Amino acid sequence: MKTELLYLTYVAAFTGLLWVPYILDRLFIRGLISAVGYPENPKPQSPWAQRLMKAHTNAIENLPVFAALVLVANAIGLSNNIIGMASIVYFGARIVHAVSYTFGILFVRTLAHTVGFFAQAAIAWQILAQ
């Protein structure tokens, strides 16, 4: 499997699993019935869980861009070291972003998001330079 497709799979799986910790927090804080229901005034989740939900939303928002770029490159038969490395960097940036967002490490979170953006831009550049 091409590196970029492998890392697209990793990014998708990671994004798909980000909800698990904050749902467990919700179950712990609110109890089963309240967690699966629609209480009028639910107990607030732990601050870290609230931040992880936002990190998850951000990951979901960025996944289509990364996926589209990787899949377009694959569709046109473009695969090189730059695209492979950018995919690895993007995956790492998403992990650092989620962890730093969850633990409230603001400057690291912003840096990780920026690195992910430039990894996407590198893939786009490779496609557009074709």
Image (cartoon, rainbow, N blue to C red):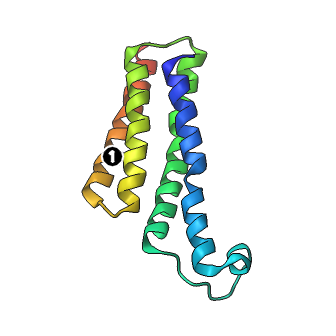
Relative image position of residue 80 (x, y in whole percent): 43, 13
The N terminus is located in which quarter? top right
Query: Is residue 34 rendered to the left or right of residue 110?
Result: right
Looking at the rendered structure, the kind of residue marked 1 is Ala
Residue at disc 1, secondary structure: helix
Local crowd size for mark 1, using a 10 Å CA cut-off: few (<14), some (14–19), many (≥20): many
Identify the residue position indicated by label 1 in the image: 112
Q: Residue at 32%, 40% (x, y): give it.
A: 115
Most extreme residue toward the left, as rendered?
Answer: 107
- The residue under the point 57% across, 78% down is 29
Whether residue 20 is visible, yes or no, is yes
Task: Identify whether 34 is placed above or below 120.
Answer: below
Quadrant of the rendering where the C terminus is positioned: top left
Residue sitting at x 48%, y 13%? 79
Closer-to-camera residue (81/121): 81
Q: Residue at x 44, y 36 (%)?
A: 91
Q: Is residue 50 left or right of residue 75?
A: left
